[in-house]
């Protein structure tokens, strides 16, 4: 099997994600679990000439290892990977890879790789030798289908972090991180994402005083994340950030998500600060507008109380707007009730609040309505 000889040296010299080689074919030499970390496997990877031990696999890639599809000496193609600086050290985060088919596997080390940093012929990262060296070969069935697709010559494979003229002025040296790979432990990162949700400005009052905020949902091809801007950041970015537009965002603060206030499918969330850097992306990028996980209307009754779900249906009935006077805030709030159904004659009542209730586009009988994060 022919590996992409020379790519490890190129990866090691890459200053930013734009310089990383595209879709290299490499061999995983060894792996070690990282206890308690979100990214659970650290790996040594070889191109047959050199090896490098600073590769970290995200949870999605780790699933392949758990299913026995990813093991030492397996040959893979790196589809999406990026650079991350942690404690002044450069690591390479593998977001997506494909395991090449069994006829392309050799189950022995390819070549006599040397450490790309020292030039010495050593066992790749000896501390990683805890993983068993004998490969466990499993033929995946439909019941044991890997979450990352197996290699296919007929299917085009996307790359991540393509450099174009629109990114050069502000982000020639940026470390572009997929949303799925973001963690609070990274101190320098940039995401490229589409704004798919944006609330109106809301005010609040607590023991520390009064303030204002708005929230956003950013989406890229790997996932989504909720972001909140407070006070000065509201003034700086509310008008700048527009729905469906794509931006580069860097310098936000990441923390564990408070699921009481967030229905976004990410264990972390972002706080936009006044010094956060946000720039428009003029590059033509095919990013999703929404990410849905629809629950059939007939199965909604099986969901636990207060579950947050996505649902789709045809508008069958729509009531007039009801205006409620909120005693706690002395404000008025609009409400509208709908009935939506599917083609199996199942139906359910839906209540729209605020600006959603006030919009006529949701009330046209016969239109298909997709609702995200309903409770």
Image: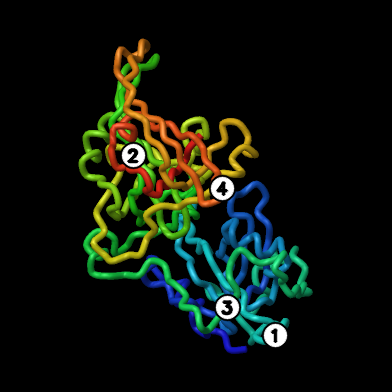
Q: Position of residue 315 (x, y in %)?
A: 41, 43
Q: Residues within 10 Å of mark 4 (few under 14, many from 20)?
A: some
Give the Cα separation between the discs numbered 3 and 4. Answer: 32 Å
Q: Earlier in the sequence, mark 2 or mark 3?
A: 3
Give the Cα separation between the discs numbered 2 and 4. Answer: 21 Å
Residue on which disc 3 sits:
151
- Quadrant location of the N terminus in the rendered image: bottom right
Q: Which mark is residue 55?
A: none
Asked which quadrant contains residue 361, the reply is: top left
Query: Can the viewer see residue 103 in this picture?
Result: yes
Residue on which disc 1 sits:
106
Q: Position of residue 219 (x, y in %)?
A: 40, 52
**Local secondary structure at mark 3:** loop
Q: Earlier in the sequence, mark 3 or mark 4?
A: 3
Asked which quadrant contains residue 109, the reply is: bottom right
Q: Residues within 10 Å of mark 3 (few under 14, many from 20)?
A: some
Q: Position of residue 266 (x, y in %)?
A: 51, 45
In the image, 147 versus 120, the foreground residue is 147
Residue on which disc 2 sits:
363
Left or right: residue 284 compared with residue 189: left
Q: Earlier in the sequence, mark 2 or mark 1?
A: 1
Q: Earlier in the sequence, mark 2 or mark 4?
A: 4
Q: Which mark is residue 296?
A: 4
Q: Residues within 10 Å of mark 2 (few under 14, many from 20)?
A: many
């Amino acid at each position: 099997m022919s590996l992409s000889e020379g790519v490890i040296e190129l990866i090691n010299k890459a200053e930013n994600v734009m310089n990383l080689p595209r879709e290299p074919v490499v061999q995983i030499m060894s792996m070690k679990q990282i206890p308690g970390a979100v990214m659970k496997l650290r790996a040594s990877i070889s191109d047959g000439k050199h090896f490098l031990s600073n590769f970290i696999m995200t949870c999605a890639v780790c699933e392949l290892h758990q299913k026995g599809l990813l093991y030492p000496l397996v040959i893979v193609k790196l589809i999406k990977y990026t650079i991350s600086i942690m404690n002044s050290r450069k690591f390479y985060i593998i977001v997506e890879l494909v395991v090449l088919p069994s006829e392309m596997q050799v189950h022995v080390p390819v070549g006599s790789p040397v450490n790309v940093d020292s030039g010495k012929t050593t066992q790749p990262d000896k501390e990683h030798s805890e993983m068993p060296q004998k490969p466990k070969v499993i033929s995946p069935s439909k019941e044991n289908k890997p979450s990352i697709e197996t290699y296919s010559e007929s299917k085009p494979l996307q790359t991540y972090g393509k450099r174009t003229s629109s990114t050069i002025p502000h982000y020639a040296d940026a470390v572009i991180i997929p949303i799925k790979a973001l963690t609070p432990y990274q101190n320098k990162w940039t995401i490229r994402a589409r704004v798919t949700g944006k609330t109106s400005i809301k005010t609040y009052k607590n023991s520390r005083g009064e303030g204002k905020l708005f929230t956003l949902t950013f989406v890229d091809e790997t996932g989504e994340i909720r972001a909140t801007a407070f006070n000065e950041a509201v003034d700086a970015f509310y008008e700048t950030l527009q729905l469906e537009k794509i931006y580069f965002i860097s310098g936000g603060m990441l923390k564990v998500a408070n699921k009481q206030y967030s229905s976004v499918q990410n264990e972390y969330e972002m706080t936009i600060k006044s010094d956060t850097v946000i720039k428009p992306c003029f590059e033509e990028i095919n990013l999703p507008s929404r990410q849905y996980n629809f629950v059939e209307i007939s199965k909604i009754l099986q969901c636990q109380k207060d579950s947050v779900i996505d649902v789709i249906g045809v508008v069958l009935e729509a009531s007039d707007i009801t205006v409620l006077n909120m005693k706690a805030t002395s404000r008025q709030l609009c409400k509208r009730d709908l009935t939506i159904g599917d083609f199996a004659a199942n139906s359910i009542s839906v209540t729209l609040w605020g600006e959603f209730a006030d919009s006529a586009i949701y009330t046209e009988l016969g239109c298909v309505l997709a609702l995200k994060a309903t409770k």
